[in-house]
Amino acid sequence: LFPKKDEAEPKVRFANFMDDRWSSYKIKDIFLERLEKSGEGELISVTINSGVVKASELDRKDNSSLNKTNYKSVKRHDIAYNSMRMWQGASGYSPYNGIVSPAYTVITPKQGINSKFFSFMFKKNEMIQAFKRNSQGLTSDTWNLKFPVLSSIKVKVPKTEEQDKIEQYMNNLDNIIKLYQGKLENFQDTKKAFLQKMFI
């Protein structure tokens, strides 16, 4: 559903978009950096596997500063990413309004841009490699990708209607995966219960 590096359009497309070309843009042409700061609001974290989540839902110690006046605002439909872990896939679409650590970067879509579509695109291996190449620092422990550098990375962009269609399709796949993961966890719990009853 996404074009390869040297392709103008993807090979697999929805039928009603076959004649529409994807255009090449720099990220700064479609996203702006959100620079507002706030010490008030739900604390949000960015994870590699689960994207943007509420910090209160994570099973780990809260190491955030008590004084959050320097924290960054994040709004629904923004994309937040860990500047030092973008090359590992630590980014995600935010379904929440809240605040994030100053170590994160928050970008907000321009009109006609489906940020959730781009949250899927940013997880592609090709994009992860681009983020890795553009991260700055002497070693991987210090690699950093701030917006001024991220903003110059080129991406291919379809019309809004195709962005929406791809986002809906990928979102449906995520929902199916979550459903089966939940069923698997239930089966595992049932197995543990039977094992406990069947052995002395």
Image (tube, grey):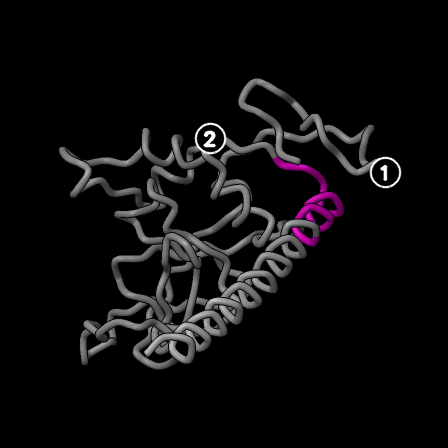
Mark 1: secondary structure: helix
Type of amino acid under label 1 = Asn
Where does residue 177 sit, x and y in percent of width and height? Answer: 58, 57
Q: Using the image, determine if residue 142 lies above or below residue 11.
A: below
Q: Using the image, determine if residue 122 lies above or below residue 49.
A: above
Which residue is labeled 1 in the image? 16
The crowding category of the residue bearing disc 2, from other C-alpha atoms within 10 Å (few below 14, some 14 to 19, many at least 20), is few
164 within the magenta span: yes
Q: Tell me the quadrant of the picture where the N terminus can be found.
A: top right
Residue at 50% in and 58% down: 93
- Residue 126 is marked as 2
- Please identify the quarter of the rendering in which residue 168 is found: bottom right
Q: Tell me the quadrant of the picture where the C terminus can be found.
A: bottom left
Type of amino acid under label 2 = Glu
Foreground pick, 62 / 69: 62
Q: Earlier in the sequence, mark 1 or mark 2?
A: 1
Residue at 47% in and 43% down: 123
Foreground pick, 111 / 105: 105
Q: How many marks?
A: 2
What is the span of residues highlighted in magenta in the rendered image? 157-168
Contact between marks 1 and 2 (CB within 8 A): the answer is no
Where does residue 20 sit, x and y in percent of width and height? Answer: 78, 31
Residue at 18% in and 80% down: 66
Residue at 18% in and 74% down: 65
The crowding category of the residue bearing disc 1, from other C-alpha atoms within 10 Å (few below 14, some 14 to 19, many at least 20), is few
Foreground pick, 12 / 133: 12
